[in-house]
Image (tube, helix red, strand yellow):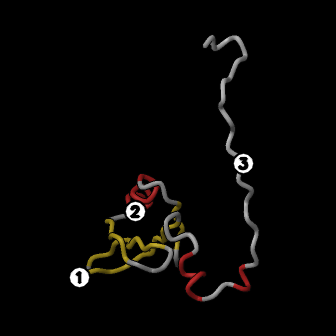
Amino acid sequence: MDINSGDRGNTTLAPATEPVAFDVRHLSEEQLAALGVSHIAYVKPVIVNGVAGFAIHAADGTPMAVAGDRAVAVAAIVQHEMHPLSVH
């Protein structure tokens, strides 16, 4: 097959998936808790054993790690292909 000939053989393209819209006001507590669990992580200041640090939590509140400073916490989240958000 010549890639310049325009002959594509029997290849078919998968249909593009459309974004799904939904009203967050009608989510159950479980659905709301699961929203963004694998994409969002929260950073909040904490004190652990008398030492200040920054806790990293999954979107559902599950503790994931503690870092010595905020920049390290955010970098760890980004390194794991998640989006960091701050909790005050």
Residue 4 spot, x, y in % from top left:
68, 11
User: In this picture, is 44 found above or below 40?
Assistant: below
- Residue 63, quarter of the rendered image: bottom left
Q: Which residue is mark 1?
A: 49
Mark 1 secondary-structure assignment:
loop
Mark 2 secondary-structure assignment:
helix
User: In this picture, is 11 found above or below 15?
Assistant: above
Mark 3 secondary-structure assignment:
loop
| Mark 1 touches mark 2? (CB < 8 Å) | no
Residue nearest the observer in this picture, 15 or 48? 15
Find the distance from the CA under tag 3 to the CA under tag 2: 35 Å
The circle drawn on residue 9 is none
Callout 2 crowding tier (Cα within 10 Å): few <14, some 14–19, many ≥20 = many
The circle drawn on residue 73 is 2
If you read the primary sequence from the N terminus, does the residue marked by circle 1 or circle 2 appear first? 1
- Residue 55, quarter of the rendered image: bottom left
Looking at the image, which residue is at 72% across and 86% down? 26
Q: Tell me if 31 is positioned left or right of 21 in this view.
A: left
Say which of marks 1 and 2 sits in front: 2
Look at label 1 and name its amino acid.
Asn
User: In this picture, is 10 found above or below 58?
Assistant: above
Look at label 2 and name its amino acid.
Ala
User: In this picture, is 70 found above or below 29?
Assistant: above
If you read the primary sequence from the N terminus, does the residue marked by circle 1 or circle 3 appear first? 3
Looking at the image, which residue is at 42% across and 76% down? 45
Say which of marks 3 and 2 sits in front: 3
Callout 1 crowding tier (Cα within 10 Å): few <14, some 14–19, many ≥20 = few
Find the distance from the CA under tag 1 to the CA under tag 3: 51 Å
Q: Which residue is mark 3?
A: 16
